[in-house]
Image (cartoon, rainbow, N blue to C red):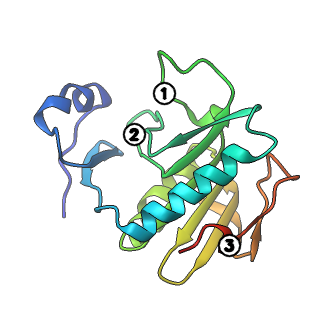
């Protein structure tokens, strides 16, 4: 499938054209987003609840299924933990991001092959890719070029930015 190439400004002007279609802008192309199923909703909801209850919730903001501003893209990660800032008039940018979380079932290849290289290219320090089908979380750290140098699949998760927080997979996996 070949995407139609557009700019970020054109993408924003198209909002009224696609009022119900879930699409995202990746490297100038428009890509359909897969429908969100119940296990996905559960995992994102639980992670949001757990992260908001953590002691560092006062030091960071958590955005759920909101766009990240990149030069030719606006991916919409499932969760984005960003530095405290005034985002009333701008979207978070790579320098704001502490942690991105993608929850995937049918979109696992798309997230791994298209979005992860994009996140690495723009220096996102840590990405968690949660595969609902295998109940495995891949933790990506140390971005270099279009990839991450450190990839692990731990049983408990501890964000680099908040080492005092530990999440067990059973706390949020359906």
The percent coordinates of residue 52 (x first, y second) are: 67, 44
User: For the residue carrying disc 1, how many other residues have a C-alpha within 10 Å: few (<14), some (14-19), or many (20+)?
Assistant: some
Residue under circle 2? 74
Residue placed most toward the observer, 116 or 105 = 105
Judged by depth in the image, the label closer to the viewer, 2 or 3, is 3
N-term-proximal mark, 2 vs 3: 2
Residue placed most toward the observer, 66 or 41 = 41
Q: Quadrant of residue 151?
A: bottom right
Q: Residue at x 82, y 42 (%)?
A: 55
Taking 167 as reference, is 22 above or below it?
above
User: For the residue carrying disc 3, how many other residues have a C-alpha within 10 Å: few (<14), some (14-19), or many (20+)?
Assistant: some
Mark 1 and mark 2: Cα distance apart in space: 9 Å
Q: Residue at x 18, y 64 (%)?
A: 1
Mark 1 and mark 3: Cα distance apart in space: 29 Å
Mark 2 and mark 3: Cα distance apart in space: 28 Å
User: For the residue carrying disc 2, how many other residues have a C-alpha within 10 Å: few (<14), some (14-19), or many (20+)?
Assistant: many
Kind of element beneath mark 1: loop
The percent coordinates of residue 100 (x first, y second) are: 59, 50
Q: Residue at x 63, y 71 (%)?
A: 138
Q: Quadrant of residue 39?
A: bottom left
N-term-proximal mark, 1 vs 3: 1
Taking 66 as reference, is 58 above or below it?
above
Kind of element beneath mark 2: loop
Is 136 left, or right, of 163 in this rendering?
left
Residue under circle 3? 169
Residue under circle 1? 91
Specify the farthest residue to the left: 17
Taking 20 as reference, is 35 above or below it?
below
């Amino acid at each position: 499938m070949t995407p139609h190439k557009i700019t970020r400004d054109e993408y924003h002007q198209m909002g009224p054209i696609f009022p119900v279609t879930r699409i995202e802008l990746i490297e100038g192309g428009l890509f359909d987003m897969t429908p969100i199923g119940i296990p996905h909703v559960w995992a994102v909801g639980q992670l949001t609840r757990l992260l908001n209850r953590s002691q560092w919730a006062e030091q960071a903001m958590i955005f759920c299924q909101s766009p990240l501003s990149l030069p030719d893209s606006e991916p919409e990660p499932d969760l984005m933990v960003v530095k405290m800032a005034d985002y009333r008039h701008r979207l978070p940018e790579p320098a704001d991001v502490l942690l991105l979380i993608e929850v995937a079932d049918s979109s696992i290849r798309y997230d791994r092959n298209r979005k992860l290289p994009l996140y690495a290219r723009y220096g996102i320090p840590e990405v968690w890719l949660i595969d609902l089908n295998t109940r495995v979380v891949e933790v990506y750290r140390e971005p270099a070029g279009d990839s991450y140098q450190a990839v692990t699949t731990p049983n408990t998760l501890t964000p680099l930015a908040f080492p005092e927080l530990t999440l067990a997979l059973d706390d949020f996996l359906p």
